[in-house]
Every structure is written in structure tokens, then in C-alpha cells.
Amino acid sequence: MARKREATNPEEAKPKVIKPPMLLEKTQVILKQLEVALDQPVITYWNSNKGSICHNDVSGLYGLLQSVGKVDRLCLFIKSDGGNGQASLRMVNLLRQYVKRLTVLAPFECQSAATMLALGADNILMGPLAHLSAVDTSLTHDLSPIDRDNDRVSVSQDELQRVINLWRRQARGEKSNPYGALFQYVHPLVIGAVDRSSALSTKLCLEILSYHLKDAQKAKKISNVLNSGYPSHSYPITLREAQRIGLHAESMEDSVNHLLFELNAVYAEMGQNAYVDYDARNAHDNSISNIMEANGLQIFFQLDKDWHYRAEERRWVALNDKSGWKKAQIAAGKISVTTFHIR
């Protein structure tokens, strides 16, 4: 019986790396239909479950706005679970230099730092599945507690305050100090950093709102509610609740909502999990995490790195990281993908 040939080249034994599809032709068609339906330019900002709002996004947004130019009106489609609030402020500042009246399209989740980004718009159009969220800040510090996977966990001001309040209610007049027990689990510097971060979140909301809302008292009320008015960071702020707290939010037309669902489906296909396990301790990730698009131009961040599990440290570490920003355009009927340099 003939023996099966064994792979002598190590590369032959490795599973093939998955590459996500480039679907610019599909997204451009839908984007143009949106611009006709809304009668104004549209740009998009979309995160997969591996993406988040970050400072590098500002450079990508700048590239889009340069292609669009300065306009009186513009719609921004946002789909994101959040990220860095300071990056949201920078994005709003950039948008306001190019757009006189900004409308945010929020058909899906627009949470945390994405809610901050939406605060910079003159009005927010929300679909039936849309929701904003609270913006109270959680922080992952170098001295944060470690979970079972040996990763640093985030700590929020609300969580800390609730522990202190619960301790004081149950102490019933005793003079014991709750911080003495808390410091065994949460480093004092982490508690100080979280308090500082909470003050930053309030400041960011006020600054972002000031770009279009001149009523300082109303801006302060909205900021306070978003930062401390909800028992959960992910509390869903639907259209009715958004209007109640003072945001200029309106219901989105069904035709626009339908087009955004189509666009999201294409982005989801591009941002699908492109993760390949080589073995129990080695893998490769080639997923697309962030996508921004305007008429004629798409800019996206693509992961391209190996992962190795260090058993002695009980954690995954990245190796051979070639991740970066890329831009896609249609030239001579074909999609051209090149590196987008942001630094």
C-alpha cells in the first residue's frame, strides 16, 4: 500500500490564512443610494466586534473629509460599541471644520464613546433597533486587578462608588473605613485614576455639545445624566429616552433604515472573523476591524498578526504584527487596495 506523502515544508502543514473579502463595489452602490435618499453627502464609520474608536481613526476621517470637501450638510452613519472618548472629541472637532450642519445616522448600537461622537451632531436619526448608552468611564490601569486569564480588568467609578455606598449602608454607624478593605483588591492609584477619568468624561461631553448647543445649562444636564444617571454602562438609550434627556433625536425613515441595514450586512461580511488556528497555542488574525467610507473612497484597518499562547504567563501575545490602515478605490473597473499612511 502506498504511504501518504508527509509535508516536509513547515508552511505546507499550516492551514491557509483567511483573507476577508473586499466589497467596495457593493458598498459604493448603497452609499450613493443613501445620498440620493437623504439629499446630502454621506460618510460611514463602522466597527466590528474587534474594533473601537481610537485616535488613529481621526486621520482616516481626515482622509475622507478631504475627498468630500467642505459642505453645508453631511450625514455620518455610526455603528460602534465605543472606545476612546478623547478620540471622539477630536473627530467632532474635525467634522465641524468641514460641515455646517451634521446629522448622525444611528440604526444600530452607538454606545459609550460612539454616543459621545453622536453628541457632536445637530440631530440624530435613530432606527427601531438603535440605541445610545451611558458614557460613564471605566479604566484599565497598569495596576488594575487581574482576571483568571491573567488580563487586566477595567474598573469604573460607578462600581467603586456602589461598593462604598453599600458598605456604609450596612455598617450602620460603625466607624470602619471601607477603603482599607477595598485597597486589598483595587490599588489606590487605580481608584484615583478612575475618579480623574470620570471627571474627564463629563468634560468631554460638555466640550462636544458646545460645538452646536449654546445653552450651557442644558448641555450640563445632558452630560450629568449620561455620566451618572444610569445603573449600567450599557443601559440602552432608545429614541424616546434620548428625547427625554434633551437630545435632538428623531425617528429615521424606513427607506433610509433599510439601506443602512443593507450596508451593515456588507460591512459585516467584510469584518467577519478571519481567524485561523495553527495549533492549540498558535493562530493568525487577518480580520478587518474599522471601516470608514465616502463616495469613491474606503479606508479600513486590517489586523495581520500571529498570536502565541505563553502557558507560563497564561496569556496570548501578538507576534509578527503587520496590521495597518489601507484604502480602497475603484480604478479601471477594479478595486485597488493600497496602504494608507497615517503617521
Image (cartoon, grey):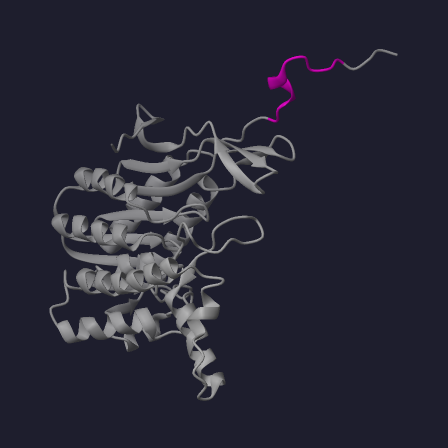
* Residue at the image point whose x is 23% and y is 49% from the top: 91
Above or below: residue 67 compared with residue 51: above
**Which contiguous range is marked in magenta?**
5-15
In front of the other: 138 or 115? 138
Of the 4 image quadrants, the one containing the C terminus is top left
The residue at the far right in this view is 1
Asked if one can make out residue 110 in the rendered structure from this viewpoint, the answer is no
Residue 253: percent from left, percent from top: 32, 63
* Residue at the image point whose x is 42% and y is 44% from the top: 267
Residue 191: percent from left, percent from top: 37, 63
The residue at the far front in this view is 175
Q: Main secondary structure of the magenta part?
A: loop
In front of the other: 255 or 149? 149
Please indicate whether residue 281 sits to the left or right of residue 246 in the image. right
Question: Is 268 contained in the magenta span?
Answer: no
Above or below: residue 156 compared with residue 89: below
Question: Is 14 contained in the magenta span?
Answer: yes
Residue 114: percent from left, percent from top: 32, 57
